[in-house]
Amino acid sequence: MLIATILSARAKDETTMPIADELFKKYPTPAKLSSANPHAVKKIIRKIGFYNVKTKNIIAASHMILSEFHGKVPDTLEDLLKLPGVGRKVAGCVLVYAFDKDAIPVDTHVHRISNRLGFCKTKNPDKTADCLEKLFPKKYWKIINDTLVHHGKTICKPITPSCSLCSVKNNCPKIGVQKQN
């Protein structure tokens, strides 16, 4: 989950998942990935953007998991953020989807929609995560990402959102919307 999420940054899921599957077939454990030849890893993930940096980060993160976390992916935000290539969104995804812990992963969709709806007035995803954590009770944190990502991909698109199809259209201030369907 961790490595796949690092790979997914600024990439589409349909591109990332087959590549992650191929990578995990060749390097199924942190030990194998930490000792992998970087050129061999790059060859596998080259279709994903930023593959040079991602190669360096996933190998270094695997090494750190072995050396500092006894071969186990950490399950706290603080420890996950110590890993190379792991920011708050990746850490949040790992907490929610791998460990079933409360977190709000904020990607471009969650950030955009949270600001468009007027929930937050933030300039970056980390500030949006802080805002949403204050706004919503913890019991809702895990569903926010899936809900808003789906809404952002299907209805509330960055350019020309389909406001006429939106279930909250009558209550949405449409902040930042220039043109709509």
Image (cartoon, rainbow, N blue to C red):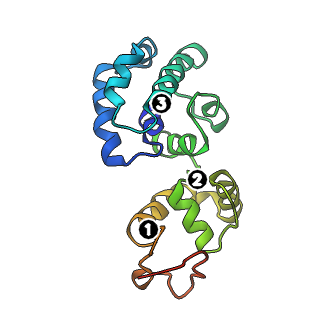
Q: Count up the numbered dots.
A: 3
Give neighbour class at mark 3: few <14, some 14-19, many 20+ (Cα, 10 Å). many
Q: Amino acid at mark 1?
A: His
The residue that disc 1 covers is 151
Mark 3 vs mark 1: in front: 3
178 vs 35: above or below: below
Give neighbour class at mark 1: few <14, some 14-19, many 20+ (Cα, 10 Å). some
Q: Nearer the viewer, residue 2 or 175?
A: 175
The residue that disc 3 covers is 54
Mark 3 vs mark 2: in front: 3
Residue 35's disc number: none
What whole-number distance in Å separates the C-alpha atoms at marks 3 and 2?
23 Å
The residue that disc 2 covers is 104
Please name the residue shown 53% across and 23% down the image: 61
Q: Secondary structure at mark 2?
A: loop
Q: Are marks 1 and 2 in contact (CB under 8 Å)?
A: no
Say which quadrant the C terminus sits in: bottom left
Give neighbour class at mark 2: few <14, some 14-19, many 20+ (Cα, 10 Å). many
Q: Amino acid at mark 3?
A: Lys
Q: Position of residue 111 (x, y in %)?
A: 58, 60
Q: Who comes first in sequence, dot 1 or dot 2?
A: 2
Q: Amino acid at mark 2?
A: Ile
Q: Nearer the viewer, residue 68 or 14?
A: 14
Please name the residue shown 57% across and 79% down the image: 174
Q: Is residue 139 left or right of residue 162?
A: right
96 vs 174: above or below: above
Q: Are marks 3 and 1 in contact (CB under 8 Å)?
A: no
Q: Are marks 3 and 2 in contact (CB under 8 Å)?
A: no
